[in-house]
């Protein structure tokens, strides 16, 4: 079977940092055929335990130290075998990661809350990791060529539109929408890991799951800070 989608800039196994900010620059869905456009390659060493202070309110910080979801890097494990169902799940993961990225990017432009910008950057690298697997297993990338806020799956499109509309009401609602995204991602990744034997795919999903759990904690902290204001 011929590949439908090629990765324009090869992301080698040694250079790939799974589950967090990869050792490549920001990646977006291209408009001319689906390859992710990678910025210049940086060091494989990733920032560990990155944390940042919350915004100032009336001269005082909100008192919460939030993790931005940055994760450690690792070389990509060996390729295994995926069933047709597992390949379909992998394609769906690409849309889920793009949904998170596009939604958080939209909220980052609307609200002065660093959590959206930080985690959107992590979602960029998560999508790159999933796209690398799509390329390995000759699975069509459903996010290829799609603009921000556009999705191949009508159900994903409807979810994005609903959450975006929810988040336009207030920062508090945007944070709750983000919390819903991470909660759904955790459930989807947990289910996808069941019965999965391919080492590289298990590695990616496991690290994405850990990242989503950190992201969820970060959004919950911000929600709590909004309630306490």
Image: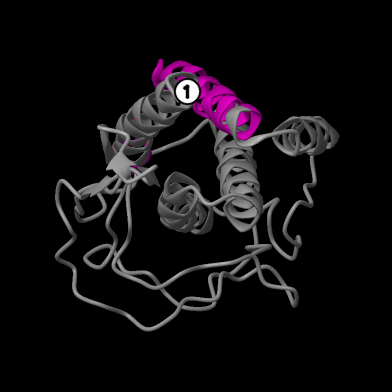
**Residue 31 at what x, y percent from top left?**
74, 74
How many labels, in total? Answer: 1
Quadrant in which residue 5 is drawn: bottom right
Q: Quadrant of the C terminus?
A: top left
Give SS at disc 1. helix
Which residue is found at the position 42% from the left and 31% from the top? 222
Q: Residue furthest bottom?
A: 40
Left/right placement of residue 177 relative to residue 201 reads: right
Which residue is found at the position 44% from the left and 80% from the top? 39
Q: How is the image coloured?
A: one colour
Other residues around mark 1 within 10 Å, as few (<14) / some (14–19) / many (≥20):
some
Quadrant in which residue 19 is drawn: top left
Q: Which residue is the site of mark 1? A: 192
User: In the rendered structure, does residue 182 fall within the stretch colored magenta?
Assistant: yes
**Residue 146 at what x, y percent from top left?**
76, 60
Left/right placement of residue 163 relative to residue 222 reads: right
Quadrant in which residue 190 is drawn: top left
- Identify whether 191 is placed above or below 91: above
Q: Which residues are magenta?
A: 173-201
**Residue 196 at what x, y percent from top left?**
39, 24
Nearer the observer, 197 or 43: 43
- Identify whether 113 is placed above or below 42: above
User: In the rendered structure, does residue 185 fall within the stretch colored magenta?
Assistant: yes
- Identify whether 187 is placed above or below 60: above
Nearer the observer, 116 or 58: 58
Which residue is found at the position 68% from the left and 54% from the top? 143
**Residue 43 at what x, y percent from top left?**
19, 74
Which residue is found at the position 67% from the left and 67% from the top? 34
């Amino acid at each position: 079977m011929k590949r439908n989608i090629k990765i324009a800039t090869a992301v080698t196994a040694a250079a790939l940092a799974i589950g967090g900010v990869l050792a490549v620059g920001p990646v977006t869905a291209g408009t001319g055929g689906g390859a992710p456009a990678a910025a210049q390659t940086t060091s494989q060493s990733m920032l560990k335990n990155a944390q940042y202070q919350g915004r100032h309110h009336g001269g005082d910080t909100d008192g919460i130290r939030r993790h931005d979801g940055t994760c450690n890097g690792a070389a990509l494990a060996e390729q295994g075998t995926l069933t047709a169902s597992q390949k379909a799940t992998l394609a769906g993961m690409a849309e889920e990661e793009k949904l998170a990225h596009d939604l958080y990017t939209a909220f980052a432009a609307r609200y002065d809350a660093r959590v959206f910008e930080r985690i959107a950057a992590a979602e960029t690298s998560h999508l790159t990791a999933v796209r690398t697997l799509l390329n390995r297993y000759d699975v069509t990338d459903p996010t290829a060529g799609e603009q921000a806020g556009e999705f191949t799956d009508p159900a994903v499109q409807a979810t994005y539109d609903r959450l975006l509309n929810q988040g336009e009401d207030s920062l508090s609602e945007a944070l709750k929408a983000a919390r819903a995204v991470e909660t759904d991602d955790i459930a989807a990744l947990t289910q996808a890991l069941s019965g999965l034997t391919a080492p590289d795919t298990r590695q990616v999903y496991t690290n994405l799951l850990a990242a989503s759990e950190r992201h969820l904690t970060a959004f919950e902290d911000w929600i709590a800070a909004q309630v306490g204001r």
